[in-house]
Image: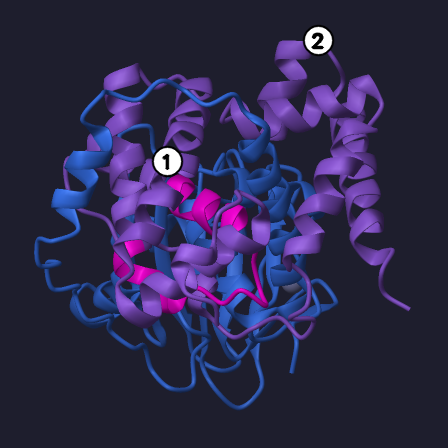
Amino acid sequence: MSPLHHPDDSLLVDYATGALDAGARMVIGAHLGACPGCSTTVAEAEAVGGALMSTLPAATMSPDALALALARIERPAPAEPTPLDGPADWIAVPTEVVRAATRRRRWAAPGVWVAPISQRPGGARSYLLRVGAGMSVPRHTHRGAEMILVLKGCYVDGDIRHGPGDFAVNDDSVDHQPRAIGEVECVCLISADSALVPRDWVGRLFQPFVGI
Amino acid sequence: MSPSSKITGVDGASLSACIVNIAERGDREAFARLFSHFAPRVKSYLMRLGAVPEAAEELAQETLLTVWRRAAAFDPTRAAASTWIFTIARNLRIDLSRREARGVPADDPSQHDSGPAAPDDALSSVEDEDRISRALATLPKEQAQVVALAFFADKPHSEIARDLGLPLGTVKSRLRLAMSRLRGALAERRP
Ligand SMILES: [Zn+2]
């Protein structure tokens, strides 16, 4: 089933031009793997990129550039790392996410685990969050923006339901307490500009353990 | 399939055929032709994005080396040669800037290139490239400016808006108009 909630077109164009930061690129890339419609939009924008590149005046290359290239293609290609597949019931994710899920997950509270994927000096971070069926994350808001993609299961935020492949952006205008619904756990891939801002004592208690 | 010696022009169809010939029989003549056409343009593209000439040339070399190694993954019914090579150059540029930023190798998240084909696999044929080029030439100036900045300035919408001194909504709507016009050009041939 195709996702119901999509990144807006400007994010898809930013993906095609290469302007997104690594975390946003990862989250939107995972959505594209699950969404033929958005993949088509990105492919169209990439075709524009290719056509634009073709219109550029040719830069001058070094005199031996072609000879060098012809020599390079004779060298054996280094073995490409084998991509790791994630769990069969998840939306497909890149190897670094699978690796984080297997090596870095830690239980943060009963039913909740977090697996950091990357953290940057400015505070930007990406991580996986797993919440057991029927459980909520503590009430919180955001400093800066957060992109979230469901890899497995479902959650409700207010009265909007998000299932596998669904994409959402949250910022400091939201104050929410998403809740996993359905029969199975909910696993999400998240990229955020900075840490969550807890809005209640449960959250303040919870946050130091998980660092999200 | 015609032998590579018959491929003489630099039109989109013959460039696509070069990649197919590389995949099918390691055609070095086809590679040389592709290199001569695309490497200088990839270098131009990277210099537009701020790379110094030496770094741009090295990345152009890597781009064409990747074309050689991954030629079998190219599907001429899904993408024009220019589109495919653009995405390779873009991904290498992103990988390089990530490695420079954090000093460790990174996985490429943009695996959708090899993912399931979009339902409309006729999207990016060679005629589409010509249609896009013609449509680009007819864009109103303010739309063309935003498109060029988006692709050649490595900037998300928000920064383009700041640079132009325009509201974000204006930049978004100009880009949206431009993209829908370009998409309209692609749709022309569809019944
Ligand atoms: Zn989508």
Q: Please give left or right for residue A180 compared with residue B177 in the image.
A: left
* Extreme residue toward the right, this view: B191
Relative to B48, is B100 on the left or the right? left
The magenta segment is B68-91
The type of colouring in the image is by chain
Chain at tag 2: B
Which residue is identified by label 1?
B36
B79 with respect to B102 (left or right): right
Q: Quadrant of the N terminus of chain A?
A: bottom right
Q: Is residue B154 above or below residue A186?
A: above
- Looking at the image, which is closer to me, A90 or B78? B78
In front: label 1 or label 2 = 1
Chain coloured purple in the rendered structure: B
Tell me what residue is drawn at x 58 percent, y 59 percent. Answer: A177
Q: Residue B165 has which mark?
A: 2
Q: Position of residue A77 (x, y in %)?
A: 13, 58
Q: Chain of mark 1?
A: B
Most extreme residue toward the bottom is: A183
A33 over B42 or under it: above or below:
below
Which residue is pictured at 85% across the width and 65% down the height?
Answer: B190
Quarter containing ligand 1? bottom right
